[in-house]
Every structure is written in C-alpha cells, then in structure tokens.
C-alpha cells in the first residue's frame, strides 16, 4: 500500500512541472511591445523606387562592407540576397512580359530588403547574451559583436530573415542594418535614405512616416503629389532640432501618386515595425511575409515567464521532488544489508 | 524475485574492434574540427542563412540530449515514483546520460560562431533571462554538474573513498530531486526554442504546447533508450538480459507514450492544424513518418506475450528513439522555412564533414561507455559474471 501511495505522491510532484506548461496565460502574460514614441525608421515607397541600387552601394560604404559577386566577371557588387556583408538590397518582382511598372500581371516592381526594426523584435527576445538590443528611445535594433556568441538563434528567429551570419570567417559576426546609428553623431542619418534620388526611402520618426504613408494612400492614383526626399522633419521642428542633421532641409519634389494597396506594411505586423512600406503589388508576392499582429516574442516570453517567473514554479516543484526523493532514496549500504536480511519486496 | 545486486566492473580488454572503429571516427571528427576552427563554419558545413542551424545543433545537442534522458527517466521512476525494483538500471542509464549531456555541452562549442565568448551566457552582465536559449544553456550546464555528482559514488567505490561516499549519500536525495527538475526544465525549453520562430515553423510543430510535447517525448525516449542500451550491452558483453525489468519498463514506456500522443493529437485538433497533415507536402509526409514511429511500439510490444521477446523490446526502443529524432528534425529543419512561403531558394542537407563530426560525437559517447563499464562498477554484478 505504501508504495502505491508514494506512487501517487510522485505523480503529483512530477506532474506539477508538466502541467505548468499548459497553464493558461494569466498574470505572466507578456503583451506585444509597442513602438517607442520617438522611434526612428524608414518609409519605403515601392511606387517611387526606380531600382537604381544607389542605396545598396551607399549602405555598403557606410557599413564598410566588401563587395559580393554573383557574376563571373566580378566587376560589380552583385549580391543576390542580404548577407553577413550586405545589409540592404533592392529586390525585384517580375511577372510575364514585365511591361508595366507596379502591375502584378505583366509588370514589375521593387522591394527593399533590410531590417524592419520591429517594435517587439524576435532577435532581441531570442539572443541569450543581450548582443541584440532595442534602444529604448530610438527603437533601433542594434548588434554588439563583442557580446555575441555566434549561436545564430537570431538568424533562425527573425521572420524577415534579416540577421545574417558571416560563415566565411573563423571570427564571423552577425550582420544587419542598424539604421546607420554609428553615423548619427556626425549628423548623418541612414545612408540609404540620404542618397535615394526619388525619396522612395525616407528617414524620420516612424510616427511621422506613418502619417506621410497615410497621406499618400489617401491621394488619388495618378494625381500630382509633393513628396519629400532624404529626411522627413517632424511637424513643427525647430531650427535647433533640424541642425542636428546634415543635408538640405527641403528636398521635396512633385511626383505622381501610385496605385497603392490600402495597406501600410509594418503598421501592425508583429506588433508593428519602425520601417514601413507601401506597394502597389501584393506584399507577399513582393517578398514580405504575412504576419499576425501578435509578435512571436510575446508568445515565447509568456511561456517562459509563466514557467519561470520569479523562479516560483521551479522552486515549488523542486521542494516537492526533494520531499519525495528524501523518503525514497535509501543509502546503498543499508540496501545491501536489507537484502541480506531477506530482500525487499 | 531477484534481489538488488551491487554493480561491478565488466572487465575485459579495452582494445577491440568497436573501440578501434570509435577511435577512427573520433580522429576524423578532430580533423574536421581543425578545419572548422581555422577557416570558419562555412568551410566544412552546408549551413546558410536560410538554415542557420544544422545537424550539429539539431542532432548533437537537441537529439543527443533527448537520447540522454535515460538517466532522468529511470531515476524519476525509482526515486520519485518509488519503484525500487528498477534500481539496477539507474547506473547504466545515468552513465549514458552523463556522456550524452557532457558531449552535447561540448558540441555546442563547435557550432558557436563566436565560441570564445561562450561564457557570456552564464554571466549576469550579458545574460538575457527572456531568451529561451539562455534558460536551456543555464539549465543544461547545471544538470551536467548535478549528474557528475549523482554518478560520483561510482568513482568513490572504485577508489575506496568510503567516508566521502557516506557523506555524499546523506544529501544525494537533493541532487536526485534537482536531477529530476532540471531535465524537465530544459527538455521542455528545447521545444520552446521553436516558439519565437513564429510562422516560419509549420503549424504541425509550431504550438504553444511544444514544451510539453518535447518534455513528454523526452521522458518516453528515456525509457526507449534504456530498452535499447540494455539489449545492446547484454549482447555485447554476453550478459543475461534483465527481462524481468525491461518487460514492466516497456509497459511504463507505452503509458508515457499514450500521454504524449493524446497531447500531440489533442493539440492538433484544438488548433485545427491537422489539415496540414493531409496535404501532399514533404512536411506532411514526415509528420506521418514521425507518427508511425510513435505508434509502432504498440504493435511491437503492446501485449504481455510480445514483451517477453527481447528483439521486440529492442525494436520498440529503436522506434521510440526514431520518433523522437523525427519530432525534433521536423520541428527544426523539415518544418522550418525562413521564406514563409516566399521562395528564397534556401536548401540544407548536411555535408559529409558535418556528418563526420556528428558520428564522431556519438562514437565518443560509445567509447566512454565501454571504457567506464569495463573498468568501473556500473552494470549489475550478477549479469557481469561471464
């Protein structure tokens, strides 16, 4: 009988840990994080992009990255995808005869591939050593090679496939866009936005960029629309604030409003991103993943915090297990002597 | 009813064919690792940014540690559920676990791209408690230490440290409790690693109950590995198979397996994800292959009569291990797609060099098991009489 009672007791102690994994999301639930109010980002407008790749070249220069070749002659930097040495790339959507720009059938379009600077980044949640961090003010997702152990969990975690590892080096690092944060102190903003000739890539506060995106979506396709280039100043910006950044203040020009899809990509995806995108071609077809409004980081951390919050659960289970084990563990010498006395049942 | 037999060394020669083969495989591994550390991961592996984790992570660490759950599963049965009759199985199972985990810990270093910083993960200045990987790393490191403590009476017996052994045995219950808790924590977290990858993982494996699935399957695999090991050790050392222990153990394994399958399919039904298994995709094929491996043991050892056949016990153990392999490979590799349906052209199949390292790691485990069981008191004495 004792052994049966012990068995049940063991079930209770052992089962507690297993059961805790399916506990409902309660006090420990971790909501999807939101963008910081002063967060910086980019607005990419595929209808304005002409695919000149000036931003790709400027990004290489700003980040001191080597050229990557995909052609035999090795004359031009020609990466086929972002990599540990290429943080920004303009990819092309092609269909049929490719006659019309921004048409899904028999047309073509462009899409910028670079870090989205998520409000709730998977890479930051995944990184075990805080090498990936999100700046609380600017919201820039930065990388610190000196902290990184090279586990590449961030590479696996990111749904945009952005952090990438340098497999070609024994001391390889993770490479990704950091919004040129290393150039900010010199008054330079993101190099891709700085050089973009059409304003397809625009730098600014995400809040302002979102308003600008909505202004463009509200415009009638084909109508004349004045669009800014380089940096989008925040409303009512003082001369002092403007002096923080180099470059002409107003580079705007008259463009034509595109036939936009009524969707600001990045407004809600995964809790929102600080890089926003507009396109006339379906975002999935152009290479952007279809993501739910809830971030995976929130799901993952809710599970972790439910199980390990304050270490309450593990300590309680350990106490139960210790209590049961203390009753059941017989020092081996005693066991032998018991056996000699006639064995145990 | 057989009484407890104290464990004893098997004895015999250390230089024989299995040892030679293991040594050759280990030498090949060392050669590959030399190249890897001089020229980088890209020089020997087929890893790429679409598949940043290959077999060194999924086989050597995730699966290697699940195979090493024999010690945890049997210790839990003996000490927590008070089934003292299984006591003779504890030491051999614990030894295999000790090797499995220690090597999984070392194996991580081969895969780390910036391995010289590995200590950051255990350092408060760097640690990120929100990271699942952090939890796994801390927990596995702690468990390796706890297992060496749990196993140390074997060395103390061999070297006649009676006083120390007595002292240790007084507090051993605490380490046994800790040695039960820690694997529960990290075996579940190895599954949670998938959660942050979000929709990149096929819904057949991406679920909030994935930690429970990995934990339940790890415990089941633990019993499967004991069946496998006991049969292999008995045949290799020409010892009597402990049928009186393995028969009821197989029953315990089937019980655990049933719990796993109920959670597995209950979750798929609740999440309405079973439809993904009915599509003509590679993922669906591998899902059914995995499920077949988990169902096979019922056909092999489902009846008391069938459990009397050692060959069936062995095969049931192998089937469970294969099911566990597939669950993990499917979650981390087959069911993982960086492109989220957008074809980026990423592919991964391990290179020969990668496979040599994985085989070398398993060879190191087998070699260690042979040396220690031949020289230290691990296997039951009655059986070691030959």
Image (tube, grey):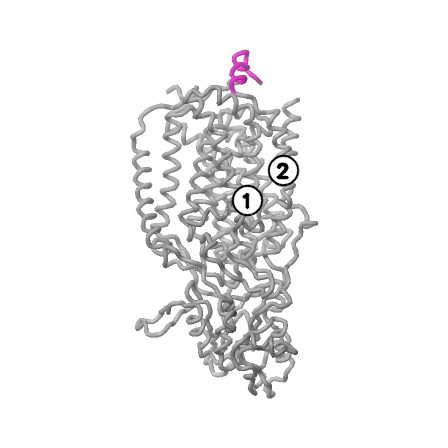
- Label 2 packing within 10 angstroms: few (<14), some (14-19), many (20+): some
Coordinates of residue B85 in the picture (x, y in percent): 54, 23
Disc 2 is attached to a residue of which chain?
A
Q: Nearer the viewer, residue A224 or B326?
A: A224
* Residue assigned mark 2: A315
The residue positioned 63% from the left and 38% from the top of the image is A315
Coordinates of residue A41 in the picture (x, y in percent): 57, 70
Question: Which label is found at residue A208?
Answer: none
Question: Can you name the residue that lies furthest to the right here?
Answer: A27
Examine the structure image and report whether residue A337 is included in the region drawn in magenta.
Answer: yes
Using the image, determine if residue B58 lies above or below residue A46: above
Q: What element carries label 1?
A: helix
The residue positioned 65% from the left and 80% from the top of the image is A218
Horizontal placement of B198 versus A30: left or right?
Answer: left
Q: Nearer the viewer, residue B141 or B353?
A: B141
Using the image, determine if residue B349 lies above or below residue A7: below
Residue B23 in view, yes or no: yes
Disc 1 is attached to a residue of which chain?
B
The residue positioned 67% from the left and 46% from the top of the image is A23
* Residue assigned mark 1: B214
Residue A106 in view, yes or no: no
Q: Which of B265 and A17 is in front in this view?
A: A17
Part of the protein shown in magenta: A332-344
Q: Which of B385 and B102 is in front in this view?
A: B102
Horizontal placement of B201 versus A35: left or right?
Answer: left
Of the residues tagged 2 and 1, which is closer to the observer? 2
Examine the structure image and report whether residue B163 is included in the region drawn in magenta.
Answer: no
Q: In which quarter of the image is residue A82?
A: bottom left
Count of marks placed on residues: 2
Using the image, determine if residue B362 lies above or below residue B89: below
The residue positioned 50% from the left and 79% from the top of the image is A49
Q: How far apart are marks 2 and 1 (CA)?
A: 21 Å
């Amino acid at each position: 009988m004792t052994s049966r009672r012990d068995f049940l007791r063991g079930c209770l102690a052992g089962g507690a840990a297993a059961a805790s994994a399916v506990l409902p999301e309660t006090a420990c639930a971790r909501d999807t994080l939101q963008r910081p109010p002063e967060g910086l980002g980019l607005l990419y407008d595929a209808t304005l992009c002409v695919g000149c790749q000036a931003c790709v070249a400027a990004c290489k220069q700003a980040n001191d990255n080597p050229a990557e070749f995909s052609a035999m002659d090795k004359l031009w930097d020609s990466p086929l995808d972002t990599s540990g040495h290429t943080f920004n790339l303009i990819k092309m959507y092609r269909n049929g005869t490719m006659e019309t720009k921004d048409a899904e059938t028999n047309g073509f379009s462009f899409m910028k591939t670079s870090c989205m600077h998520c409000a709730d980044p998977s890479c930051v949640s995944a990184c075990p050593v805080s090498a990936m961090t999100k700046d609380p003010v600017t919201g820039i997702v930065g990388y610190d090679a000196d902290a990184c152990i090279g586990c590449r969990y961030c590479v696996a975690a990111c749904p945009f496939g952005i952090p990438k590892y340098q497999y070609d080096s024994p001391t390889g690092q993770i490479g990704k866009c950091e919004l040129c944060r290393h150039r900010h102190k010199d008054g330079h903003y993101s190099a891709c936005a700085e050089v973009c000739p059409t304003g397809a890539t625009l730098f600014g506060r995400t809040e302002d960029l979102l308003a600008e995106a909505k202004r463009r979506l509200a415009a009638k396709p084909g109508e004349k629309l004045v669009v800014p280039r380089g940096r989008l100043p925040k409303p009512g910006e003082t001369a002092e604030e403007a002096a923080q950044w180099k470059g002409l203040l107003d580079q705007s020009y008259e463009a034509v409003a595109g036939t936009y899809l009524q969707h600001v990509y990045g407004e809600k995806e995964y809790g929102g991103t600080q890089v926003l995108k507009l396109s006339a071609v379906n975002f999935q077809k152009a290479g952007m993943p279809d993501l739910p409004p809830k971030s995976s980081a929130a799901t993952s951390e809710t599970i972790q915090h439910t199980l390990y919050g304050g270490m309450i659960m593990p300590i309680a289970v350990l106490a139960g297990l210790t209590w049961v084990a203390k009753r059941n563990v017989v020092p081996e010498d005693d066991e032998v002597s018991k056996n000699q006395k006639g064995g145990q049942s | 009813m057989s009484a407890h037999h104290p464990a004893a060394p098997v004895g015999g020669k250390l230089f024989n064919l299995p040892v030679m083969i293991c040594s050759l495989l280990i030498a090949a591994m060392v050669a590959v690792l030399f190249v890897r550390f001089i020229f980088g991961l890209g020089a020997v592996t087929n890893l790429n940014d679409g598949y940043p984790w290959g077999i060194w992570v999924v086989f050597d660490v995730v699966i290697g540690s699940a195979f090493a759950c024999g010690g945890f599963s049997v210790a839990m049965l003996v000490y927590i559920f008070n089934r003292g009759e299984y006591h003779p199985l504890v030491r051999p199972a614990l030894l295999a676990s000790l090797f499995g985990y220690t090597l999984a810990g070392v194996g991580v270093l081969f895969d780390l791209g910036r391995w010289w910083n590995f200590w950051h993960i255990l350092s408060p200045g760097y640690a990120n408690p929100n990271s699942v990987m952090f939890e796994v790393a801390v927990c596995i490191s702690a468990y390796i230490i706890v297992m060496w403590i749990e196993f140390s009476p074997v060395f103390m017996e061999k070297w006649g440290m009676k006083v120390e052994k007595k002292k240790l045995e007084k507090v051993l219950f605490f380490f046994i409790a800790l040695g039960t808790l820690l694997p529960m924590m990290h075996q579940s977290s190895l599954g949670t690693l998938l959660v942050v990858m979000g929709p990149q993982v096929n819904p057949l494996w991406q679920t909030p109950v994935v930690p429970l699935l990995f934990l339940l399957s790890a415990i089941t695999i633990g019993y499967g590995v004991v069946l496998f090991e006991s049969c292999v050790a008995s045949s290799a050392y020409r010892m009597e198979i402990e049928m009186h222990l393995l028969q009821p153990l197989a029953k315990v394994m089937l019980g655990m397996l049933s719990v796993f399958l109920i959670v597995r399919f209950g979750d798929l039904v609740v999440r309405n994800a079973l439809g993904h298994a009915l599509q003509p995709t590679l993922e669906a094929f591998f899902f059914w292959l995995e499920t077949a491996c988990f169902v096979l043991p019922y056909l092999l050892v489902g009846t008391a009569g069938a459990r009397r056949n050692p060959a069936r016990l062995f095969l049931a153990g192998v089937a469970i291990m294969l099911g566990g392999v597939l669950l993990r490979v499917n979650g981390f590799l087959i069911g993982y797609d960086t492109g989220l349906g957008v074809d980026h052209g990423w592919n991964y199949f391990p290179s020969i060099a990668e496979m040599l390292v994985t085989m070398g790691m398993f060879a190191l485990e087998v070699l260690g098991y042979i040396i220690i069981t031949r020289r230290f008191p691990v296997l039951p004495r009655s059986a070691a009489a030959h």
